[in-house]
Image (tube, helix red, strand yellow):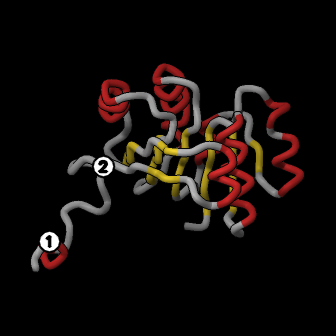
Amino acid sequence: MSRVTVLGTGHMGSAMVKRLISQGIEVSMWNRTRSRLTPLVELGATAHDSPAKAVVNAEVVITALTDGAAVNGILGEAAPGLSKGTVIAETSTIGPMAVTDLHGRLPDYVHLVDAPVLGSVPAIKAGNLTILAGVTRRRSPWWPPPSNRWER
């Protein structure tokens, strides 16, 4: 993973951007409040004026937004910039109904990972954030698993 976009740079999103940069990962980002981007640009992240511009060429897009409506709206704006095979890690903890709705709205050529997190900013800073990732068969680059993976 070398190109990551973070959509939403509030407390969690900005901590994620800082951690990614500290690991040498190229980070693009977008946030509704432009002033939140300035300190992250000074650390080496690239700010964009729109979600669609921010996701261009991203291998992974991380959402760190307030609720299901925000996630659906922002990813709807980002959709034109998504590339084939992009993985979207939805970390906003928006609930199963919102994830199902989002799944139906995204282009078929991207992969959605429902990835709510356990932990907060201190866990991100320490590199200990727990991510609970779930994927569906239809949109997972990891499905079906290799046949020997499940055999013992």
User: Along the horizontal axis of the image, is 117 left or right of 133?
Assistant: right
Q: Position of residue 151 (x, y in %)?
A: 10, 76
User: Along the horizontal axis of the image, is 128 left or right of 101?
Assistant: right
Q: Which amino acid does label 1 sit on?
A: Trp
Residue 67 in the image: above or below residue 40: above
Q: Position of residue 63 (x, y in %)?
A: 55, 40
Q: Quadrant of residue 54?
A: top right
In this figure, which residue is indicated by the disc labeled 1?
Answer: 150
Q: Residue furthest left?
A: 151
Q: What residue type is labelled 2?
A: Val
Closer-to-camera residue (109/74):
74
- Total numbered labels: 2
**Which residue corresponds to the image point at 62% horizontal and 43% vertical from the top-left?**
120
Query: Mark 1: few, some, or many residues within 10 Å (few <14, many ≥20)?
Result: few
The local secondary structure at tag 1 comes to helix
Quadrant assignment for the N terminus = bottom right
In whole angstroms, how far apart are the C-alphas of marks 1 and 2? Answer: 17 Å
Q: Residue 79 carries which label?
A: none
Quadrant assignment for the C terminus = bottom left
Closer-to-camera residue (95/98):
95
In this figure, which residue is indicated by the disc labeled 2?
Answer: 135
The local secondary structure at tag 2 comes to loop
Tag in front: 1 or 2: 1
Mark 1 or 2, nearer chain start: 2
Q: Position of residue 148 (x, y in %)?
A: 14, 79
**Residue 110 in view of the camera:** no
**Which residue corresponds to the image point at 33% horizontal and 26% vertical from the top-left?**
101
**Which residue corresponds to the image point at 63% horizontal and 45% vertical from the top-left?**
6
